[in-house]
Image (tube, rainbow, N blue to C red):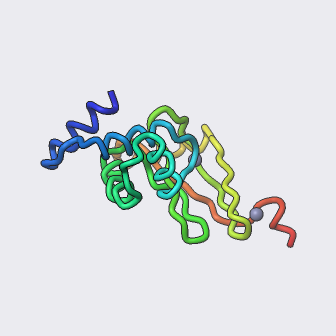
Amino acid sequence: MQTERFTSYLKGRGLKLTQERLAVLKGVAASDGHFDADELAMVVKGINPKVSRATVYRVIPLLVDAGFITKTIRTKGRVSYERLAGTTPHDHMICRACGVVIEFHEPRLERYIRSTCAEHGFVPEEHTLSIRGYCRGCAGK
Ligand SMILES: [Zn+2]
Ligand SMILES: [Zn+2]
């Protein structure tokens, strides 16, 4: 199903579903939680050893654009991604000191986002909320 969606997305851009692109998509399906490009490249290597890191870096923007993954967190200069399909919507608290990422799901916040969008006649599909600050362990230091 994901493969079909990716194929039609690529077709719309005059691109083909190559073995390399397919391997990156499979790598995403096999990844849980947050991962960065290098971590994804490691997973993809296990699926198809011929896929280079450079290829993974080139395919990631396509997967973001096609809505398979989203860019979520940036800690210490690193960009992280996570899968969109099959994950519960959640937001993030990111500690500036140690880089820990706390995921939380707050239905009140979601209701609020939905009603705010409705007031503007806007149909929300996804949102990203990152709260930056200091975790319990770092806040007192
Ligand atoms: Zn911390
Ligand atoms: Zn997350």
Measured from the top left, where is residue 22 in percent x and y?
32, 40
Residue at the top extreme? 1
Determine which quarter of the picture holds residue 132: bottom right
**How many discs mark residues in the rendered view?**
0
Residue lying at 63% horizontally and 41% vertically, measured from the top left: 106
Residue at x-position 47% and y-position 57%: 37
As drawn, the residue found furthest toward the left would be 14
The residue lying toward the viewer, choosing from 22 and 82, is 22
**Quadrant location, the N terminus:** top left
Query: From this viewpoint, is residue 90 visible?
Result: yes
At horizontal 41% and vertical 58% (from top left) the residue drawn is 53
Q: Nearer the viewer, residue 92 or 44?
A: 44
Q: Is residue 118 visible?
A: no
In the image: residue 106, left or right of residue 29: right
Name the quadrant where ligand 1 sits. bottom right
Q: Nearer the viewer, residue 113 or 20?
A: 20
- Relative image position of residue 88 (x, y in whole percent): 55, 35
Q: Which quarter of the rendering shows the C terminus?
A: bottom right
Residue 79: x and y, percent?
51, 62
Where residue 63 appears, x then y in whole percent?
35, 48
Residue at 18% across / 43% down in the picture? Answer: 16
Question: Most extreme residue toward the front, as rendered?
Answer: 49
Q: Nearer the viewer, residue 41 or 64?
A: 41
